[in-house]
Amino acid sequence: MTDEHDLEPGAEPAARAPDPGAAEAIRCADCARSDSLVTDLDPVDRMPIPVEAVAGFPDGVPRANGLDRRAFLRNGVLGLASVYAASKIDWTRAFEAAVAEGASPANQLVMIFLNGGNDCLNTIIPISDYAAYQAARPNLARAQGPSVAGGQVGSTVIPGTGGALAWANVGVAGQGNNNDTRGFDTLWGDGSGGAGSDLAVWPAADYTPANRSHFDSRDYWFAGALQKMATGWLGRWMDAYGSADNPLQAVSIDSSISKQIRTSKAPVSAIRSLNGVEFRVDNVATNLVNTTEQMAPVAAVPVGNGNDGLARSRGTYGLTVQVSRSLRTLAGAPANGGYPQSDLSTRLQLAATLLGANLGVKVVTIDWGSFDTHGNQLASQDPQLTTLSRALAAFQADLTARGVEGRVMTVVFSEFGRRVASNNTGTDHGAGGLMMAMGSSVRGGLRGAHPGLKTLYQGDLAVTTDFRAVYSSVVSEWLGGDPGAVIPGGPFPLGGPLVG
């Protein structure tokens, strides 16, 4: 990290402590919070998501004429979308636009931001420069070969790299690695870019010159420009090519919209969760006693004539059971074995539900993790890499089970990499971070050169891919449109197709 970048104007850098990692952790105490969300805008409305909407309105969108809002939501609400737009949008018109767009499914994009600056060098190990890597990180380096139980994490050579690179075993499938049947390695396949090679990797993606500030770097990545802008790169795409009526076209799975999808006019939304409607009994775990299903027979008991109060009560019970069952069916774990338990899995599962609902969802953003590993890096980064590898693979399988995987691309990025040399227990802010794209339509394999450790950029990995080149290809090859209308300062050639 460049010490001065995250200081307040006029502040003096703190004195260097014996443990550099500890000093940087103190200096960056506020950096752990994410700066990805728009906080200076309030939503213009909270739009309910009815059961019928997530099911794709199989009986058609309810018409506004003759229906009040209560009737529109007669079968229950699964969640609320916070709508950000120039003016308030009529719910029915919004859902009509969503269903109309969903009738002709388009390519969809999921952007996953790894908050804090993920360390690429301990995710993908430079085996060809292993001696220099080990010397620079004597306390953090991965071993070559299997991991040692209770000891050093090992690495697995990445096919198609000529033995030059290896995955850290915490992201690789198998017992003693990520303890799953899927991981980065199964997504990667043989790395040829053909069938089964569904993961593209850029091992040193960034911008130059790097300034290593969380706040500036995040703003640049979210804006798709080396300057702060009022709109995000995907927000500008929505303004140019999106819908004027459908706020579900771009969804941040969070409490507010991501800066990436901030627009000047097109409506977008944030959805924190789809919350089921169900009966609960205090201090009784729902995995032991499903009280909602126990209420189902009660709701079905016939009511005699003249007992309108009881009829309404039992009708309400029946509606609760119906909505709860609908949510479990729509957003529940798919038949492919489901997701590992994690907050990232929960968000990806919601993303899969929205992407498969044919509501015109084109972009989903997710902000996850805490990768600012100035100290105690192994204990912090390793379980997150395990979670990420397993959740991504489960997400891919879920999309396949829903029949939409071929039209979804997932891009993973962080605001920068870390320094090549470690401090006592971690690494400080650097350059040349890891960027990945996943999907069966993605041309997988090593898409950007690994710069190696022989020639460094001010102690960091040399940047070999401008992140804006990936963004430009996402626009031109995947979403559709002119990258020049979205990414200023171009063109930014990627050096080969992203898709195909």
Image (cartoon, rainbow, N blue to C red):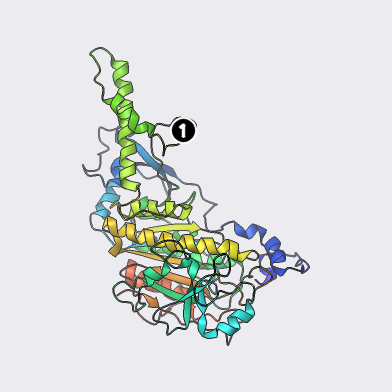
| Front one among 183 and 3 | 183
From the viewer's perspective, is residue 18 above or below residue 280?
Answer: below
Residue 484 visible here: no
From the viewer's perspective, is residue 186 above or below residue 295?
Answer: below
Q: At 78% from the left edge and 68% from the top edge, which residue is drawn?
A: 15
- Image location of residue 420, percent across then percent down: 61, 77
Instruction: Report whether 460 appears left or right of 477.
Output: right
- Image location of residue 232, percent across then percent down: 47, 62
Q: At 45% from the left edge and 76% from the top edge, which residue is drawn?
A: 202
From the viewer's perspective, is residue 58 above or below residue 301?
Answer: below
Asked which quadrant contains residue 285, the reply is top left
| Front one among 404 and 136 | 136
Asked which quadrant contains residue 295, the reply is top left
The residue carrying mark 1 is 284
The local crowd at label 1, few if under 14, some if 14 to 19, many if 20 or more residues have their Cα within 10 Å, is: few
Asked which quadrant contains residue 234, the reply is bottom left
Residue 478 visible here: yes
Quadrant for the C terminus, please.
bottom left
Residue at the extreme front:
149
- Image location of residue 303, percent across then percent down: 25, 17
Residue at the extreme right:
15
Q: At 30% from the left edge and 76% from the top edge, which residue is drawn?
A: 194
Task: Tell how many labels.
Answer: 1
Quadrant for the N terminus, please.
bottom right
| Front one among 400 and 432 | 400
- Image location of residue 472, percent across then percent down: 40, 73
Tell me which amino acid carries mark 1: Val
